[in-house]
Amino acid sequence: MLNVLCGRIAQRARYVIRRFARRQDGSAAVEFALVATPFLALLFAIVETALVFFAGQSLEAAAAESGRQIMTGQAVGFSQGDFKNKVCSYLASGVSLFDCANKVYVSVKTYSSFSAVNTSVPIANGKLDTSNLPYDAGGPGDIVVVHLYYQWPIYVSLLNASLANLGGDRLLVATSVFRNEPYQ
């Protein structure tokens, strides 16, 4: 009797499984949900990575253009705020990706030789230390290093481990090293 009962239960279970496997109502929705979630996550990660690299290139271009102002003597008499405004004018052309007023930091320092140039980033306790950023554009013939820093927020949590290098942000650094021209 027990064998017959177990046989009927097994037969009924096979019938239910076969019937479930043959039904296709809602299968497209389930397949879409299974495929769409990783696809959208990957898509957002690609877009955010592209934005970070585009922002980095924009910052590099701004460092080169604003550094040219110092190199040719057009920035003589600029304060650090004036120079930052010049940097922001280069960053603001086109679409504004940057919070220039609050997140762009400028460091300009003069050196006696190219071998003495220090390009280390002022990070203290895992944060950008902006308390003592110098501004010395030097004079004709001086060697000058222009650093621009920007903390780009990372939103896609999948990228926090690989793209973020400063807490939950990506620290973008642009550097321009040059010798001032012998301007008057």
Image: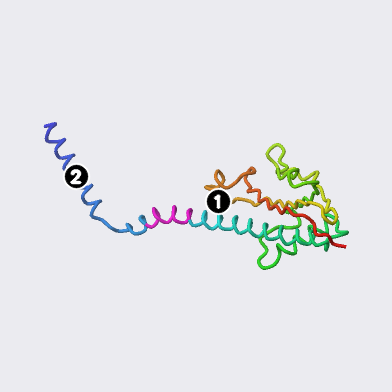
Magenta-span inclusion, residue 35: yes
What residue do we see at 80% from left, 62% from top? 72
Task: Give whichever of 157, 114 is nearer the camera.
Answer: 114
What residue do we see at 70% from left, 62% from top? 91
Q: Mainly helix, strand or loop, the magenta region?
A: helix
Give the amino acid at mark 2: Arg
Residue at far bottom of view:
94
Whole-percent x and y of residue 64? 71, 59
Q: Quadrant of residue 124?
A: top right
Disc with the residue nearer the chain's start (1 vs 2) = 2
What residue do we see at 62% from left, 45% from top? 168
According to the picture, the residue beneath numbered tag 2 turns out to be: 14
What residue do we see at 36% from left, 55% from top? 30
Give the amino acid at mark 1: Val
Q: Looking at the image, is 9 positioned above or below residue 59? A: above
The nearer-to-camera label among 1 and 2 is 1
In terms of secondary structure, where does tag 2 sit?
A: helix
Colour style of the rendered protein structure: rainbow
Whole-percent x and y of residue 11? 16, 42
Magenta-span inclusion, residue 57: no
Contact, mark 1 vs mark 2 (Cβ under 8 Å): no
Q: From this viewpoint, is residue 103 visible?
A: no
Position of 32 with respect to 92 (left or right) is left
- Quadrant (top left/top right/bottom left/bottom right) for the N terminus: top left
Residue 122 tag number: none
Whole-percent x and y of residue 81? 83, 56
Residue 156 tag number: 1
In terms of secondary structure, where does tag 1 sit?
A: loop
Q: Quadrant of residue 5?
A: top left
Region in magenta: 32-42
